[in-house]
Image: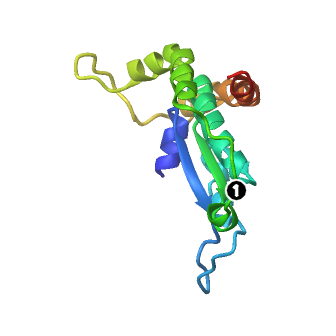
Amino acid sequence: PNMYKIAGELIPCVMHVAARAVAGQALSIFGDQNDIQAVRSTGFAILFGSSVQQAVDFALASHIATLRSRVPFVHAFDGFRTSHEIQKIQAYPKEIFQKVVELLAPEIDAHRARGLNPNHPHARGTAQCDDIYFQAVEAANKYYLDVPHYVEEAFAWIEKL
């Protein structure tokens, strides 16, 4: 329920998930990613890396894209193979993250401004009739339609940095 609420309120968020099989009739360490498939209907965008380097790159890209688009993201990678793989990667120096924060300063400020504040109270989570509820659902579509652009833009930023 929380993921639906986060997506419904267009709250920038990234969940990093080491995907594994969800226990059914027995425990399994193999990565069929059915845990990620279970969240597809929540409204979260999903970036799924298939290598250790992609896990690093997609983590940063998902943070950039969620702040730019306001759509929450699940950044996933194979929880058995990738998390146990020993590979050399191109790690990002601290300066890259500082530059990203500088570039995203307007989005970060806007995100903070949307947060709850006792000095500026407002109502959230109200009950709505179906006509108003579905108008709000349709109004959110423009944010989701822009997600591919913001993901491509995030990778372009990373490439330039």
Question: Mark 1 highlights which residue?
Answer: 87
Q: Nearer the viewer, residue 147 or 10?
A: 147
Residue at screen point 63% across, 66% down? 84
Q: Nearer the viewer, residue 35 or 10?
A: 35
Q: Report the side of 58 relative to 97 (left or right).
A: right
Q: Nearer the viewer, residue 26 or 153?
A: 153
Residue at screen point 76% across, 30% down? 148
Which of the colour schemes (rainbow, by chain, secondary structure, one colour) is used? rainbow
Q: Nearer the viewer, residue 23 or 53?
A: 53
Q: Amino acid at mark 1?
A: Gln
Q: Is residue 103 above or below residue 41?
A: above
Q: Quadrant of residue 60 in the image?
A: top right
In the image, residue 118 lies at what x, y percent?
Answer: 23, 22
Would residue 80 be visible to someone looking at this image?
Answer: yes
Would residue 135 be visible to someone looking at this image?
Answer: no
Residue at screen point 73% across, 21% down? 160
Q: Quadrant of residue 38 in the image?
A: bottom right
Residue furthest out toward the top: 106
Sort mark 1 into few (<14), some (14-19) or many (20+) by Cα contacts within 10 Å: few
Residue furthest out toward the left: 118
Q: Report the side of 117 relative to 71 (left or right).
A: left
In the image, residue 146 lies at what x, y percent?
Answer: 72, 25
In the image, residue 13 lies at what x, y percent?
Answer: 52, 38
Q: Is residue 27 above or below residue 156?
A: below
Q: Report the side of 46 relative to 13 (left or right).
A: right
**Which image quarter holds the C terminus?**
top right
In the image, residue 129 lies at what x, y percent?
Answer: 50, 34
As helix, strand or loop, the secondary structure at mark 1 comes to loop
Residue furthest out toward the bottom: 25
Q: Is residue 32 above or below residue 23?
A: above
